[in-house]
Amino acid sequence: MDSDDGNIVKISTFRKKARDTAKSEKAAQAAANRVRFGRTGAEKKRDKLERDRTERRLDGTRRETHPDKPDKSG
């Protein structure tokens, strides 16, 4: 008589393995996307702030030209 009474299996063990596998696959996909798309969100934000700061500085030092007077450069 073969019975499985001696082989008690916890379903949570199988669920944990499935969860760990899914987690590692997700991490691998994230790593591939980082390589594929390049920069992180923080890097993009930093570059945008630098561009904005530079633009404000240039706008602050720009000379105003009067629309009625022709420009002497050309």
Image (cartoon, rainbow, N blue to C red):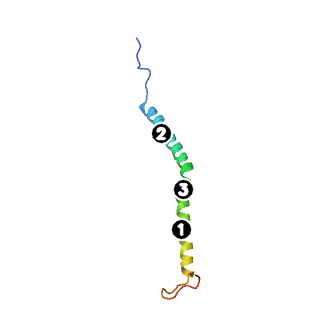
Task: State the CA–CA distance, disc 2 to disc 3.
Answer: 23 Å
Please name whichever residue, 70 or 29, is drawn nearer the observer in this view of the structure: 70
Name the residue located 55 percent from the left edge and 69 percent from the top edge: 51
Where does the image place residue 40, in percent across and percent down from the top left?
Answer: 54, 56
> Which residue matches tag 3?
40
Q: Which amino acid, mark 1?
A: Leu
* Disc 2: which residue: 22
Task: Name the residue at 52% across, 48% down.
Answer: 33
Q: Which residue is mark 1?
A: 49
- Which of marks 3 and 2 precedes in the sequence? 2
Q: Quadrant of the C terminus?
A: bottom right
For discs 2 and 3, the disc positioned in front in the rendered view: 3
Q: Nearer the viewer, mark 2 or mark 1?
A: 1
Binning the other alpha carbons within 10 Å of mark 2 as few (below 14), some (14 to 19) or many (20 upward) gives few
SS of the residue at dot 3?
Answer: loop
Element at badge 1? helix
**Residue drawn at point x = 53 percent, y = 43 percent:** 28
| Labelled pair 2, 1 in contact (Cβ < 8 Å) | no
Q: Nearer the viewer, residue 64 or 19?
A: 64
Which of the two discs, 2 and 1, labels the residue nearer the N terminus? 2
Q: Residues within 10 Å of mark 3 (few under 14, many from 20)?
A: few
Query: Image point 49% across, 41% down: which residue?
Result: 23
Q: Is disc 2 in contact with disc 3, using a CB cutoff of under 8 Å?
A: no
Q: Residue furthest bottom?
A: 69
Q: Which mark is residue 70?
A: none
